[in-house]
Amino acid sequence: EVQLVESGGGVVQTGGSLRLSCVASGLTFDDYGFAWFRQAPGKEREPISCIAPGEIDATYYADSMRGRIAISSDNAENTVDLQMDNLRPEDTAVYYCTADENLCTDYGRGMEYWGEGTLVNVSS
């Protein structure tokens, strides 16, 4: 059974930073793409970034947070991290870790496996 468990959310002031982490289990890590999505209250979910740990230089960023985030993976620990800097109140959302055997191809359309999410609250 594929499981994705996020951590690292919390309350942060405007301009602050958070590092989200996702631990993946029940899969062969290098065979999957991992993407972060977020969903703010009353809004549709949106993709943020994707990484395919088994591919070279396979990282992708959506426009929503480009320049303020960095995605990375640790193949030894089966983790995918999302470093977020210069956070704004509009970044307040539940952030989800996702995975798909289709790597990052069309990741914005959704991924097969989803974690429960971690809440990020940016105060003004």
Image (spheres, rainbow, N blue to C red):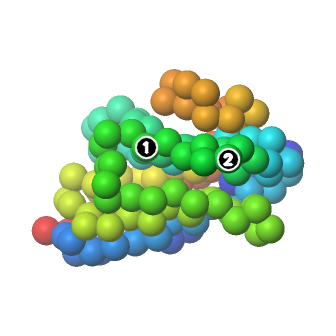
Name the residue: 32% across, 59% down. Answer: 68
Task: Please provide percent x and percent y for residue 2.
Answer: 80, 46
Circle 2 SS class: loop
State yes or no: discs 1 and 2 in contact (Cβ < 8 Å): no
Name the residue: 67% across, 47% down. Answer: 56
Q: Amino acid at mark 1?
A: Tyr
Q: Residue 17: which numbered mark, if any? A: none
Would residue 108 be found to the left or right of residue 41 on screen?
Answer: right
Name the residue: 27% across, 74% down. Answer: 16
Task: Please provide percent x and percent y for residue 110.
Answer: 55, 29
Circle 1 SS class: strand
Q: Amino acid at mark 2?
A: Ile
Would residue 76 be found to the left or right of residue 58 on screen?
Answer: right
Mark 2 burial class by Cα count in 10 Å: few <14, some 14-19, many 20+: few
- Viewer-side label of 1, 2: 2
Which image quarter: residue 13? Answer: bottom left
Name the residue: 13% across, 68% down. Answer: 124
Task: Please provide percent x and percent y for residue 71.
Answer: 51, 57
Q: CA distance from mark 1 to mark 2?
A: 15 Å
Task: Please provide percent x and percent y for residue 90.
Answer: 21, 52
Question: Mark 2 sits on what residue?
Answer: 56
Would residue 82 be found to the left or right of residue 21 on screen?
Answer: left
Which is more N-terminal, label 2 or label 1? 2
Tell me, yes or no, if residue 42 can be seen here.
yes
Q: Is residue 83 above or below residue 58?
A: below
Viewer-side residue, 45 vs 48? 48
Question: Mark 1 sits on what residue?
Answer: 61
Mark 1 burial class by Cα count in 10 Å: few <14, some 14-19, many 20+: some
